[in-house]
Amino acid sequence: MSYDMTQTNIFRGLAGMVLPLLLLLPLPAGAEVAQDAREPLTVKLTTTVNHDHLYIDAFYHGGTVSVRGESEPGTDLIIKISAAEGDVSLKRKGKVGGLLWMNVGDLHFSQVPGLYLLKSSKNIAEMMKPEEAERHVLGYDALGRHLVVEPAATESEKEEIVGQFIQFQEQHNLYAQQTGEIEFADENGKRIYRTVFAWPFQAKPGDYAVDVYEVKDGQVVAAAQSAVKVEQAGTVKYLAGLARNNGAIYGIFSIIVALVSGFGAGAIFRKQGGAH
Amino acid sequence: MYLYLPVALTSINALMPMGLGFAVGLLSGLFGVGGGFLMTPLLIMMGIPATVAAATDSNQIVAASTSGTYAHWKLGNVDFKMGLYLLAGSLLGGGLGVQLIKVLKAMGNADFVIQITYVVMLGGVGGYMFCESLAQLRKGKGEQADAPAPARDSGMKKFLASLPLQTEFSRSGVTHSSLIPLLLGAFVGVLAAIMGVGGGFLMVPVMVYMLRMPMHAVVGTSLFLVLFTCIEVTFLQAYTNHTVDFILAVLLLVGSVIGAQIGTIFGRKLKGDQLKILLAVIVLAVTVKIVFDLTLTPDLLLSQGGGH
């Protein structure tokens, strides 16, 4: 994350708690905000996530995560759910001999969020300048410039590869960007926002950050953070652990089950069929 | 009903792998092939990562080929002696093939060689089997279709007969030098390792045309071989790559063990040449599909690694 605030770290420590979390984060030093004294913010941005702890059990098929909170009237909102950044390697296809499409090499992507779900109340390009979007990695354009690709010879080549990469992640339901999916309501004079994210079952176990940004006059004026934790449970947790930590036993067990089923089917059919 | 797969890290409708397992199990029982060349790409299409698809498929084949070997053994179709010679050869060949892949990867054109080998072998084997069994069906009208084809090249026959260690393989009704199945097994092993497949679709024509075994003995013996190869692959994948998904394997094998039994029953009702021509059609269809994949512009120029 681009904020270097101690609250963020404290917050991450709290991420494991089952209680819905609520956190108020004013901008650091409020430099830009303070200078723009025309309209000081009176209401602070808040955010709460329901279903913030997802358990992957044997019948898990994804879920929903709803985000709500209070925001300053007259501002736009961007809500981003993302995973910690990591590296990804993919094969790149190209034409060989002018005829055949084949893998022609590896592409290494770094600073890649494993999940990137974003909703904004308005088109991000209309809300702010590209530099401001890049500062907080808001939207596909900013994300594209944030990603590092190797090897990419030219800027235009990188752009093309990154576009393909985002499409690749979208196909696996790991990246999504939507405009206008945030609802606003007036409750007791407060402006309440709410939205629901479809949580993809492809998202791996781990901690996810929910960041809400309040935008006014082309600037991010406030931000709040919450979290979603995804964890394996029950049989899924047991089998995944065994596969990872006890490969030999897991392999032998899998083979024995296969052999027994094969013989079992043979024995059943022999009894039933009988006619040789 | 959706089930979550703990190693593939994805969720799947349980009926899909069960149905797929059944279909591929049928092919195993009918033709003596593992069916990896069909199963792995279909699993990838269902959203399973390529490495997990290949490893889990080999676990599933252990079940299907046990079921099939058992059914064929009851019918007297498994030549264990021939099977063990071929197995020894293919294990040696497999080791050699793995080294060859390393060399190719170091040279940087492994993918090209793998793809071309795949297309040429599938196309060649499928085309030859198709033409040959079509000619047999037309000529023989089926009366002696299951008998070994007469050796055409008598010079070759003399040379083969002059080799040492002549052994009778009574189940298959053939006599060969022990070196022949060892060498042919090694040949298939090398190719299978390069292509990253079990090699059943190569072993079947080798046994039919080079070892001159009757088709029904070929199917049973091939399944016996596939069983051992896949036990080895499953263990290595689980131990070194942690890519075997137990839940997915169980869903697949529930379908495939039943499919293999039913395939064996159907196989008994078909003649050897009818079986050959059906297998040839399937192999050719897969070849055509791969050729399309290679020549049509893909939607995305990125893909996951580790398909082989």
Image (cartoon, coloured by chain):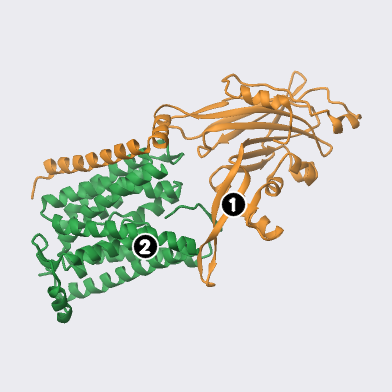
Above or below: residue A186 compared with residue B93: above
Q: Amino acid at mark 1?
A: His
Rendered green, the chain in question is: B
The local secondary structure at tag 1 comes to strand
Q: Position of residue B288 (x, y in %)?
A: 39, 66
- The quarter holding residue B290 reads bottom left
Q: Residues within 10 Å of mark 1 (few under 14, many from 20)?
A: some
| Residue positioned 71% across, 49% down in the render | A145
Q: Where does label 2 land, which residue?
A: B286
| Residue that mark 1 sits on | A108
Q: Provide the chain ID for the residue under circle 2.
A: B
- The quadrant of the image that shows the C terminus of chain B is bottom left
Determine whether, in the image, residue B163 is placed left or right of residue A30. Answer: left
The answer to whether any part of residue A6 appears in the image is yes
The kind of secondary structure element at disc 2 is: helix
Nearer the observer, B262 or A73: B262
Q: Quadrant of residue A259?
A: top left
Residue reaching furthest to the bottom: B155
Instruction: Tell me the quadrant of the picture where the N terminus of chain B can be found.
Output: top left
The answer, for residue B244, to whether it is visible in the render is no
Q: Which residue: 31% across, 46% down?
A: B60
Horizontal side of residue A19 vs B98, given as left or right:
right
Q: Nearer the viewer, residue B115 or A219?
A: B115
Q: Amino acid at mark 2?
A: Val
Q: Mark 2 vs mark 1: tell me if same chain.
A: no
Above or below A221: residue B294: below
